[in-house]
Image (tube, coloured by chain):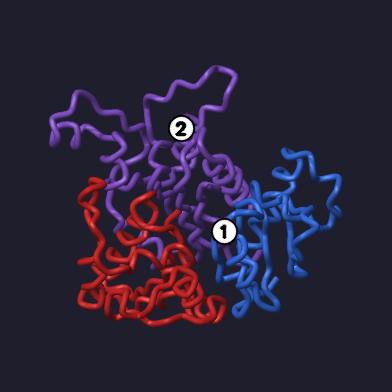
Amino acid sequence: MPENVNTTLHIINKAPEHARFRHCLASVQQGDTLLLIEDAVLALLDRERQLPGASYGLETDANARAVANRVPAEQLVDYAGFVQLTVNHSRIINW
Amino acid sequence: MPQPLSYTLVITGAPWATQAPQTALSFAQALLKAGHRIDRVFLYGDGVHLASALSAPPSDEQHWPRLWSEFLSGNNITAVACIASALRRGIVDKTEQARYELTASNLRAPFEIAGLGEWVEGNLKSNRVLYFHGAH
Amino acid sequence: MTTLIVIDQPPYGSWTGREALDMTFSLAAFDQPAAMLFLGAGVNWLCKGQAADAVGQKSVEKNLAAAALFGVEQILVDSRACAKYGLETSDLLPGTTAAESISETLGQYSRVVFAG
């Protein structure tokens, strides 16, 4: 898969209520990808918040928090998928 | 497979206080499995606690410093704890123990103590630099 | 390839801001291009007249005021946060640049880094 030179992978590990979460969402541009890990997977369930189109959750963290079954399977990635996302994006912001 | 990439992994979250050491380790294992290279692991801020040789968690809990040292040694990966962060938090090697006339040293092999220059080098030379922070 | 270091925590209550400053000055010391963005509550790092002694800490005012001399390219400040905290330009250290749109600001840097 070719490297996306103009798009960014945003990785966030904070719960949706964390102040930095808002800044992260505001910075996701058209074509970017958002990867939610650790506590951030809860955002996949947060009805008050609209996530950008290309948003994924880390499966292991969703399973840990017993929320994986409430998220469409295609929105969850494993660690190999996490790696592949970082390979595909030359610009990565860890929020 | 397409060309392997080189990574610097920065850990700023402490074990048993954040998920950072676990997420980073699972990611690192997946990275190597996918054929990529880890140039270095850099511990910064509270992340330096991962390099302590004195952690004694209950036997039914994951021993993060030991798991990391086994992974690093087993794969010959350079691992550094930032000196400014480490000294403040009482993570010291024999050199610093002598310099500050401390009663003991406690740096877990294969971690070494070095400055932020290691991070600057990673920023410059590695294809990717990833950060594993606490969630607070 | 300028690295933008972002600080979004206020001073003195936690150490990630100091750690971010150390990263910034390290980049500058190794002649690597660096800039800083003070975001959200982090804008308070730039207030004039910080009396940090009484809480047993060193003030970073002098370091920040001298940042340009150390080679830091820009000190950007979140305008919306300044408005929220009632900070006018005259309340801030000299040499700062207002950042109106955070997403636009971030988009200008190839590397964006938080210290913690």
Which residue type carries mark 1? Ala
The answer to whether residue B79 is above or below residue A25 is above
Mark 1 residue element: helix
Q: Residues within 10 Å of mark 2 (few under 14, many from 20)?
A: many
**Image location (x, y in percent) of residue B125:** 40, 66
**Image location (x, y in percent) of residue C34:** 35, 73
Colour used to depict chain B in the structure image: purple
The answer to whether residue A49 is above or below residue C108 is above
Q: Residues within 10 Å of mark 1 (few under 14, many from 20)?
A: some
Instruction: Give the blue chain's letter.
Output: A
Residue A93 location, quadrant: bottom right
Per the image, the residue denoted by label 1 is A19
Mark 2 residue element: helix
Mark 2 vs mark 1, CA separation in Å:
30 Å
Residue C51 location, quadrant: bottom left
Residue at 25% in and 34% down: B93
Residue at 14% in and 35% down: B100
How many labels were placed on the picture? Answer: 2
Per the image, the residue denoted by label 2 is B65
Task: Tell which of B63 and A47 is nearer to you.
Answer: A47
Q: Nearer the viewer, mark 2 or mark 1?
A: 1
Q: Which chain does the numbered disc 1 sit on?
A: A
Colour used to depict chain C in the structure image: red
**Image location (x, y in percent) of residue A1:** 70, 70
Residue at 19% in and 23% down: B103
Left or right: where C15 falls relative to B59: left
Marks 2 and 1 in Cβ contact (< 8 Å): no
Q: Quadrant of the N terminus of chain B?
A: bottom right
